[in-house]
Amino acid sequence: MSGIMGAQVKNAGTDNHPVPLFSVLVVDDEKEFIHTLMKRLRRRGLECEGVLSGEEAISKICAREFDVVLLDMKLPDMDGNSTLVEIKTMRPDTRVIILTGHASVNEGVEGIKNGAVDYLMKPVEFESLFEKLLMAANRTDCSQSSHVIDTRK
C-alpha cells in the first residue's frame, strides 16, 4: 500500500479507472443522510456503501472489508454499540467512527471502550468528518487536531 494525499491506496489504477482512496460503510437510519453523505464522499474519491440497519451492516462487513465504518448509534433493529461489537468481532482491524444525533456521554464512552476510534455529534461539518475519516483510514489518532487534507487536487 502506498499513501496518496494522506490516504491509503490498495492497488494502482488507470487514468480512466482511478482506485478509490479507501472504502467507507455508512450505517444510519436516515436514507437521505446516507445518500447525501455518500455523494459527497464519492466526489472526494472514496468508495462508499450505505445501509439502514445494524443487521445490514453486519451482513456487509461479513461479505467484504471496509477501511472505515461510519456508524450511527440509533438504528431500527439494534443499538450502535451492539453493532460495533459485532463489527469488531468479525473485522477487528476495521476502524469505526460513531456519528450520532442522539448522543449521551455514556454511549460515547462505551463506544470507545468497544473499539470505536472516535465519537462525533450530528450535525458535523463535512470537512471535519472527512478529516476524521482520513485519519481513521491512515490509522492516525483521531483525537489529534490536524489540518484538513484537500484531495481535490
Image (cartoon, rainbow, N blue to C red):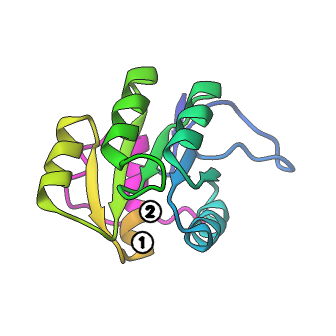
Circle 2 Cα neighbour tier, 10 Å, few/some/many (<14 / 14–19 / ≥20): some
Residue behind mark 1: 127
Residue positioned most to the right? 16
Circle 1: residue type: Glu
Dominant SS in magenta: loop
Closer to the camera in the image, 111 or 39: 111
- Circle 1: element type: helix
CB atoms of marks 2 and 1 within 8 Å: yes
Circle 2: residue type: Phe
Kindly indicate the quadrant of the structure image that contains residue 124. Answer: bottom left
Q: Which residues are magenta?
A: 131-153
Measured as percent of width and height from the top left, residue 80 is found at 36, 48
Closer to the camera in the image, 93 or 26: 26
The stretch drawn in magenta includes residue 69: no
Q: Is residue 26 left or right of residue 102?
A: right
- Circle 2: element type: helix
The stretch drawn in magenta includes residue 144: yes
Q: Is residue 17 left or right of residue 77?
A: right
**Quarter of the rendering occupied by the C terminus:** bottom right
Residue positioned most to the front? 77
Closer to the camera in the image, 111 or 40: 111
Name the residue located 54 percent from the left edge and 40 percent from the top edge.
55
Measured as percent of width and height from the top left, residue 84 is found at 36, 38
Measured as percent of width and height from the top left, residue 130 is found at 44, 62
Q: Is residue 18 left or right of residue 44?
A: right
Residue behind mark 2: 130
Name the residue located 44 percent from the left edge and 52 percent from the top edge.
70
Circle 1 Cα neighbour tier, 10 Å, few/some/many (<14 / 14–19 / ≥20): few
Measured as percent of width and height from the top left, residue 53 is found at 53, 50
